[in-house]
Amino acid sequence: MLYQQKQYPFYNPVLVRISIGTCDLTVNYVESLDQSCVEFSHSHDCYEVYYCLSGEQHIYINGTIHTLRAGDFSVIRPEIRHNTNYEPNTLKSYLVFVFTPPTSSVSKSKNAHAEGDFFSEILKYFEKNPFYVGSDKFNCSSIISKMESEIQKNYPGQDQMICALYQEYLISIFRNLDHVENNKSISSNRNLAIQITKYMHSNYYKQISLQDIANVFYVSPRHINRVFEEYFGTSFKRSLNIYRLNYAKNYLIDTDYSVEKVALLVGFSSPKMLYQLFRELEDMTVAEYRKLHCRASLPPSDTCSDDCAICT
């Protein structure tokens, strides 16, 4: 009888280049293995991920044995000696995923902050820790099933789909690393202009200044104005006042609040700006706007009286 390692169709020796955040990396090799695999103790300049799919896997990392059961995984950084213990009578199946990290964890974008990039945080973790062993909370096994199906078949767009699945698998694996902090600061690869407008929609009624916005998004006031000019062709202050004007319309139509009260409710320090903007942008006075929309909301047979509480 000749003992040999079983060969599975889930094997991809092709170098696949993927990007995670601002980091590029190369997937060197992916394969599904079982208890018939004989593995010698080794180290290399790649990261290696072992994911236990079934059974029980014993793996030596830096001379210490660790037990992986279904849904457990280990990530081993480059130059760390390791191997799976050969136990031919212990049924198991597992995935080996090997990838080469970028030559530098520094972002390839001159304007991006590496500390705000997810994968850069992962690399920082492994600069201090030789390996990680943990349990999968993000159902990576379902991604593995998709990877296996894609590798075995030859559908159009196969290379692109494999690339996307590799990326999804690694991101999901690394999301399990509970020692890696989730950096919630605003990273520069987000659309800052849109993020600021979202904040303005939520806070227009407050006395927010350009400096307040700059503090929230960790940038300078000058940068905020520059972003608005480039993206919207207008200034932050002008945009905020237009938001306030439009939100004021709701109060003018739905309530009998005085113009002074409406102005304060939408964030103007006085009603003067509201009056000016109405004349400039709506080509009518506040009173004319109120009367127009009050009448429009009435049934055709009714008319707005001269002493209407909303119009006057």
Image (cartoon, rainbow, N blue to C red):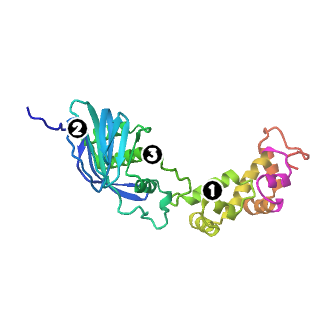
* Residue projecting furthest to the right: 307
- Mark sitting earlier along the chain (3/2): 2
- Mark sitting earlier along the chain (3/1): 3
Task: Please tell me which residue is depicted at 66% across the width and 60% down the height of the picture.
Answer: 213
**Where on the picture, by quarter, is residue 245?**
bottom right
Q: In this view, does 183 lie to the left or right of 297?
A: left
Q: In this view, does 48 lie to the left or right of 128?
A: left
Question: Is residue 258 covered in magenta?
Answer: yes
**Where on the picture, by quarter, is residue 220?**
bottom right
Badge 3 crowding class, 10 Å Cα cut-off, few under 14, some 14 to 19, many 20 or more, is some
Relative to the observer, which residue lies in front, 269 or 68?
Answer: 68
Badge 1 crowding class, 10 Å Cα cut-off, few under 14, some 14 to 19, many 20 or more, is some
- Mark sitting earlier along the chain (1/2): 2
Pair 3/2: label in front: 2
Specify start and end residues of the magenta stretch as a single range.
254-272
Q: Which amino acid does label 1 sit on?
A: Thr
Q: Is residue 157 visible?
A: no
Badge 2 crowding class, 10 Å Cα cut-off, few under 14, some 14 to 19, many 20 or more, is some
The residue wearing badge 2 is: 86
- Point out the image quarter for the N terminus: top left
